[in-house]
Amino acid sequence: MSTLVLLCLLPLTWGQNIVQNGNMETMDHWNCWNIHCELTTDHHSGQHGIKASGRNHYYEGPSQTLSGLKANGRYKVDGWIKLLNDQSGHLGQNVELEVSVDLNSGKKAYIAAASHPLARSSDGWIHLTGDFNAPADGIKSSSVYYQGPSPGVNFVVDSVAVTPLASNTHWRAESDATIEKLRKSDINFHVSTAGGISDNQVEIDVIQTKKSFAFGTAVNCGEYLNGDQRYINFINKHFNWAVTENALKWDLMERQKGNINYDVPINAIKKLRSNGIKVRAHNIVWSVDQYVPQWVRPLRGQTLKDTVKHRIQDIVGRTKDLVEHWDVDNENLHGFWFQNTLNDRDYNLDIFRIAHQAGPNVKMFLNDYSVVASGGMTGAYRDQAIRFKNAHVGLYGVGVQCHFGDNVEPDPTLIKQHLDTIAQAGVPIWITELDLINADENKRADWYETALRAFYGHPAVEGIMFWGFWSERHWKGEQATLVSGNAFRINAAGQRFLDLTEKQWMTNENHKLSQSGKNFKVRGFHGDYTIKVKVNGKEVPSLAQSFTLGTSAHTVTLHVHN
């Protein structure tokens, strides 16, 4: 077994659980300030759990002072919770494992280490899982505790762990090994030569002309239609996928009922397609309150359902032969307006079902944040994807946005941990809205390379989309971009992106028969290829071949003559 393969099999290194009595077989080390706690035989594992009742605030729950939390340490959090009753008038409860940290500076940090929205007693035991980076400042004290449910909601908890997660020093080798295995296939050459032509006269060029893997960007549809030609040209030259940034969002398309701007997004999609660029459509509905169209907000009951159904059938029907993907119900881990308004926790499944029926050949996606760039909602997203998958409503994959925080360096260890967790749902993952922020373009280049390598080198990831690239058309401005200013300068981050995607992750090789022999193999990245043959340095056009290399090996047979 090769060294690279062995590296791929190495597990993440966990430290010792710093929670004492995490299995909750007794009440030792657990505090229940101002509430009632008792040991119960209702448990997830072992023989006991801890029941919490008599709560007056959402933030009250069993807690423990942590010993050994280290500044800037990386930690994984796990715990189980079961609600014992529901609250009338509420679809569900947000449940969390929270970490609070008192700093030597006098400041206090609150970290939502693991969250799960819309929990109900009928869900039974819920696994809260996530991770966090401890503050870099000096830590005076810290604690972990359950919180979230409304006062009057009782619950049982069990099996809590806060474990250090060591840096994966082999991540780059693991990523490279995955890229080599999954993003490339063999091209087998069998060459014969006519009489009078010797091996040292023949050269074969193996030239990749197009990538199969999706590298894309969010596109300002108006700018792409009629704007700066440099912006248009950069998209056409350097990306093979695009996503509509804003123009298909319901609240922007239809600010007033019935006054719908179809022309800009649909014409932009047609133009993108004419330039060989595939399109993700974003988004059908957005469940976060502030993004629901103003005129929709007063609607209730069947009128609201009919209005949502018309929106879905209309926009999916108009685009089903133009786009590859739709983000269906955007950020549904963070917003539940439609479900709350209709008092139906499962209405998000209905939205997907209607969308899939309207465009059965379009791949339908969930799309959310704080699931890869940070880890507080990662486990909840996996669970949501499993729920949608098991409901058979047409879910194809999950979009992970990947907006990294201000000056937050991507952590390849945590990225892999998050992607591995989400991949447990068994559906493809797309990086849908990548950006990160560093004013130093050289550091930004390094950070983007780390993120891109971690994503491209993960077997569940099918595509990577930037959320813009040019400072003049980027919601985060210059400090997040690949291209800078009115001069349209490809900065260090942009140069790094192009080096990775158009040099390191493209195949372009020259083989001399005198060195390679007449039977040789090229390990090539998936995509379109052209083979050119030269005899005595002069190309023989009649011998050229073109093909697409996919996941299976391809054989090229050549008989070389003048």
Image: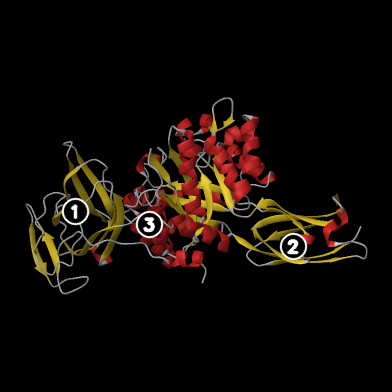
Residue, far top: 486
Residue pointed to by mark 3: 381
Which quadrant is the C terminus positioned in? bottom right
Give the alpha-carbon distance from disc 1 to disc 2, as whole Å: 59 Å
Residue pointed to by mark 1: 68
Determine which quarter of the picture holds residue 527. Answer: bottom right
- Amino acid at circle 3: Tyr
Q: Position of residue 179 (x, y in %)?
A: 55, 58
Q: Is residue 142 above or below residue 424?
A: above
Q: In this view, does 67 lie to the left or right of 296?
A: left
Mark sitting on residue 44: none
Q: In this view, does 379 lie to the left or right of 475?
A: left
Q: In this view, does 457 lie above or below 272?
A: below
Determine which quarter of the picture holds residue 385. Answer: bottom left
Residue, far bottom: 47
- Describe the element under mark 3 as helix, strand or loop: helix
Q: Residue at x 21, y 42 (%)?
A: 138
Residue pointed to by mark 2: 516
The colour style of the image is: secondary structure
